[in-house]
Image (cartoon, rainbow, N blue to C red):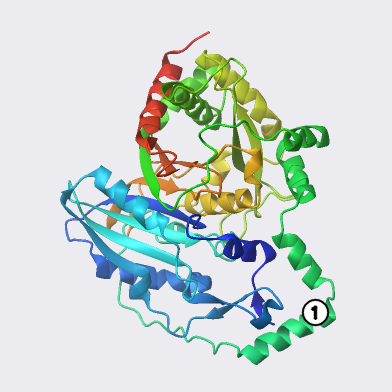
């Protein structure tokens, strides 16, 4: 049987265009070890791990006449050097120059004639640092059979890359005739398949309503939000082909202090810090902000399947991320009230018995947030952009140092893709005492994304000093 793309995976390919690349990215920064860490070592490390990621050596092939969804086939011309590329900043390269490079790399779609991932080994950073920028298409990472590359190349101890024999032999791809025969055979066995394909790819109002019902936990609330789209504002713009990228570095200890003071979760505090920043950003742009003003965030959260408490072999919860809609109270001037409002909104998820606690997520091997961000982006990608203003994805990471080969990772920033009418997506992760934000924005609509990033830091400081 052909390894056919699911309807969701196929939709990511069908809907992608030059202005909305559908890949998830990450920016990992490393200290260069004394004995060096170069492009050849990165190639060796990734080649070793590809045996665990067969999808990373497969490409998508369309069925003639579009009689069925595309299939995955081994890339007989697979070239690791094409996918793991070498880049450099003019030394001593600044962080801002790195973020400019990231924005340009993330703005480019990938070649659909090749496996849908890329990695860039970036040298020249000041302080004898190096960076690894990864891009993985949303159709690749499903969380069960395939995880994100960034999860698999990191270890808790330094690892030397020893020479090894790669025994992978690509299977011969099916001919056009075989693809047609397989498609016809499936149609005969399941005559409703073609109709289901169309239904899955098309996004009609009833499908959107069903997804919103899951997101907000009630039919009445779902209908209310479908009938009343997300508030209008500068975050909902038809995106251009350009991107801007900014980061925020904060300390996990600050969130723990606020948590102890107010009895909330770290995720509540992350969203409250973003809310306060959005309030100041809107005011700085002269936007009208009243006490009732909100910004609707789509916040995907990891959940347990019913009657499931174990982790899958791939290292993730079995294996689901559900999107939740959260109206961020940007009109509320009091930071504590903003925090309590968000905490109350998310408490229903925490009380459902299906939420995945941060401590459980930390049992996952490797840098699991890389895969969780990809799964969350997949979950959000099937939503109509008319019902939310921005996407916020937060996934906790390990609090111990991680290594790629011999190089120690010092910080990690997610890069979340933009939907067609969303000008901003925010990824957040924690790692080794830090909480790191990656803000991916549209270059035309959100050229001041660095200003918003600075306001997140200010908003967190406001929360640290706030009390009843």
- Residue drawn at x 70%, y 41% as measured from the top left: 354
Left of 285 or right of it: where is 216? Answer: right
Horizontal and vertical percent position of residue 229: 68, 35
Extreme residue toward the top, this view: 468
Taking depth in this image into account, of 224 and 334 the one nearest to the observer is 224
Horizontal and vertical percent position of residue 208: 73, 47
Horizontal and vertical percent position of residue 215: 70, 40
Q: How many marks?
A: 1
Q: Which residue is mark 1?
A: 187
- Residue drawn at x 42%, y 69% as measured from the top left: 49
Report if residue 319 is visible in the image. Answer: yes
Report if residue 155 is visible in the image. Answer: no
Left of 290 or right of it: where is 407? Answer: left
Left of 360 or right of it: where is 461? Answer: left
Is the N terminus in the top left, top right, bottom left or bottom right quadrant? bottom right
Mark 1: few/some/many CA within 10 Å (<14, 14-19, 20+): some
Query: Which picture quadrant has residue 7?
Result: bottom right
- Residue drawn at x 29%, y 61% as measured from the top left: 121
Asked if residue 18 is positioned above or below residue 179 in the image, the reply reads: above
Secondary structure, mark 1, is: helix
Taking depth in this image into account, of 317 and 6 the one nearest to the observer is 6
Taking depth in this image into account, of 9 and 437 the one nearest to the observer is 9
Horizontal and vertical percent position of residue 300: 61, 43
């Amino acid at each position: 049987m052909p390894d056919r793309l699911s309807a969701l995976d196929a939709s990511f390919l069908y809907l992608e265009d030059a202005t909305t690349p559908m890949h998830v990215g990450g920016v990992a920064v490393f200290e260069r070890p004394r004995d060096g860490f170069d492009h050849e070592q990165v190639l060796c490390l990734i080649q070793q791990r590809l045996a665990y990621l067969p999808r990373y050596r497969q490409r998508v092939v369309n069925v003639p006449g579009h009689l069925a969804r595309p299939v995955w086939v081994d890339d007989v011309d697979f070239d690791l050097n094409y996918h793991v590329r070498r880049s450099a900043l003019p030394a001593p390269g600044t962080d801002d120059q790195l973020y400019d490079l990231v924005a340009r790399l993330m703005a480019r779609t990938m070649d659909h004639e090749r496996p849908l991932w890329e990695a860039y080994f970036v040298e020249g950073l000041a302080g004898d640092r190096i960076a690894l920028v990864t891009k993985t298409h949303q159709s690749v990472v499903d969380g069960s059979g395939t995880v994100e590359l960034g999860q698999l190349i990191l270890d808790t101890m330094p690892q030397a890359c020893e020479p090894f024999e790669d025994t992978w032999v690509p299977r011969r791809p099916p001919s056009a005739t075989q693809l047609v025969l397989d498609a016809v055979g499936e149609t005969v066995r399941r005559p409703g398949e073609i109709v289901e394909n169309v239904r899955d790819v098309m996004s009609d109002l009833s499908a959107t309503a069903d997804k919103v019902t899951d997101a907000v936990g009630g039919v009445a609330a779902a209908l209310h939000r479908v009938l009343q789209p997300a508030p209008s504002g500068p975050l909902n713009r038809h995106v251009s082909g350009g991107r801007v990228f900014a980061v925020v570095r904060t300390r996990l200890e600050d969130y723990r202090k606020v948590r102890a003071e107010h009895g909330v979760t770290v995720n509540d505090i992350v969203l409250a810090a973003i809310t306060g920043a959005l309030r100041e950003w809107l005011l700085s742009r002269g936007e009208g902000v009243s006490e009732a003003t909100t910004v609707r965030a789509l916040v995907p959260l990891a959940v347990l399947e019913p009657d499931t408490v174990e982790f899958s072999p791939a290292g993730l919860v079995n294996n689901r991320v559900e999107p939740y809609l959260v109206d961020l109270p940007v009109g509320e001037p009091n930071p504590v009230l903003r925090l309590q409002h968000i905490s109350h909104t998310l408490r229903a998820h925490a009380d459902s018995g299906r939420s995945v606690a941060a401590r459980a997520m930390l049992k996952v091997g490797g840098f699991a947030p890389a895969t969780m961000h990809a799964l969350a982006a997949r979950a959000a990608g099937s939503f109509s952009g008319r019902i939310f203003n921005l996407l916020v994805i937060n996934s906790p990471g390990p609090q111990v140092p991680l290594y790629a080969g011999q190089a120690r990772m010092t910080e990690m920033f997610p890069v979340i893709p933009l939907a067609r009418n969303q000008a901003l997506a925010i990824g957040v992760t924690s790692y080794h005492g830090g909480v790191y934000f990656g803000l991916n924005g549209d270059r035309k609509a959100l050229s001041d994304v660095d200003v918003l990033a600075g306001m997140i830091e200010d908003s967190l400081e406001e929360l640290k000093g706030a009390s009843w």
